[in-house]
Amino acid sequence: MPDDFIPWTKKYLPKTLSDIAGHGKAIEQIRNFISKFKKGKALMLYGSSGGGKTSAVYALAHDLGVELVEVNASDSRNADSINELVGNASKQMSLFFKSKLILVDELEGIAGRQDRGGVQAVQKLIESSTYPIILVVNDPYSEKLKSLRKASVLVEFTERPHADISSFLKKICQKEKVDYDEEALSMIARKSGGDMRAAINDLQSLSETNKKISRTDVEELGDRERTEAIIPALIKVFKTTEPGIALGVFDNVNEDLDKIFLWIDENLPKEYTKPADLARGFEALSRADVFKGRIMRWQYYRFYVYCYDLLSAGIALAKDEKYKTMTEYKPTSRILKLWMASQRNMKKKAISEKIGEKTHTSRKRAMQDTLPYLRAVFRNNKKEGERLSEFLDLDREQIEWLSNQA
């Protein structure tokens, strides 16, 4: 793949532990655990998304020159799959006569509703493994992870200082020959909230056009957040099979529910290419639409939680496994069509209200019984149309709409 198309988050992954910025204390604790490793104890790395936990494990394996055996708990939730992937590896010598590190990433995945002995399987591996096991989790204090927490040494990846993120962004700019304003980089770093991935993504996005980043560019990025905030949320839904990761992703997205429906409807077939996955995905989408209809009909607003659960975790769980292909998510053209239809409907309602006021009928009755005849009058009898326009107090756009309706 040409360098131009490689995401910078991948291109600038830390190769060694010394490359990881802002986590000096955590790195020291990791090294200490490995140097004093004893059978029966795991290392649990925790902290917010984008904090560098998984990257640290890859860098550690590189520094030690050991084989890394990885299982993603979002894909392998039950005891059989975990034992198949990790069980033998935890006891056997490496093919290359190296030592090993065993990584269990997205640990929340085995504590979900499809967990069938997954937690117990990992616990037994910790007790029997001759190699260090490293668990990666966002929130270690979930009740379902209690037994694993007791069997682990906890290391927190705290929020990175803004200065460390800004310094790393500066190095990327220098390597990519991007002209930058230091204040702009500082703004990107602060905006990321400690998430290095988010900061790098923003940097690449802003520099794609003219290889230059200014404070104005970053401020404009903030203005575009309404459109762009939906993309990271879609990535989390489409690229995970863990409900705990998907749930709540739309809570802070500045899009109304109808727009979220349309985004998913447009991009679901692009992401889920297997017919069974696609069918289950649209089933979750249709169920969400059922709840939305009930909300509108009965005004039971507490049902909104079911809409969002189905649009997030429901869609995420519809696939058997994550798709590794990169998909470009785009807004649907249906939004424009719906807007145009809405505009036409607004004109119909406005005219019907004026008819209702003059004829002492409801807007609904005026729309059904009177409006069709009014259209015929305006198309076929210009003089009578002018008289009715004056009587109903129609504006120019309303007159044009009536005259042009087929």
Image: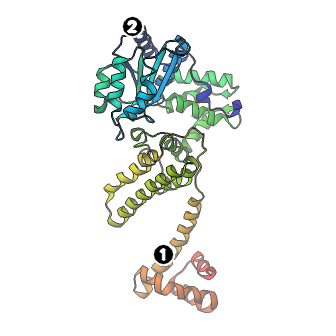
Dot 2 alpha-carbon crowd within 10 angstroms: few under 14, some 14 to 19, many 20 or more: few
6 relative to 313 in the view: left or right: right
SS label for mark 2: loop
Q: Nearer the viewer, residue 68 or 46?
A: 68
Dot 1 alpha-carbon crowd within 10 angstroms: few under 14, some 14 to 19, many 20 or more: some
Q: Nearer the viewer, residue 183 or 273?
A: 273
Does residue 255 lie above or below 343 as drawn?
above
Quadrant for residue 215, please give it. Answer: top right
Q: Where is residue 380 in the image (x, y as percent from the top left)?
A: 63, 90
The amino acid sitting under disc 1 is: Lys
Residue lying at 45% horizontally and 40% vertically, measured from the top left: 241
Q: Name the residue under label 1.
A: 349
Upstream in the sequence, badge 1 or badge 2?
Answer: 2
Q: Position of residue 65 (x, y in %)?
A: 55, 12
Does residue 97 lie above or below 183 as drawn?
above
Residue lying at 35% horizontally and 17% vertically, measured from the top left: 128
Q: Where is residue 329 in the image (x, y as percent from the top left)?
A: 58, 47
SS label for mark 1: helix
Quadrant for residue 398, please give it. Answer: bottom right
Quadrant for residue 212, please give it. Answer: top right
Could you tell me which quadrant the C terminus lies in? bottom right
Q: Name the residue under label 2.
A: 36
Could you tell me which quadrant the N terminus lies in? top right
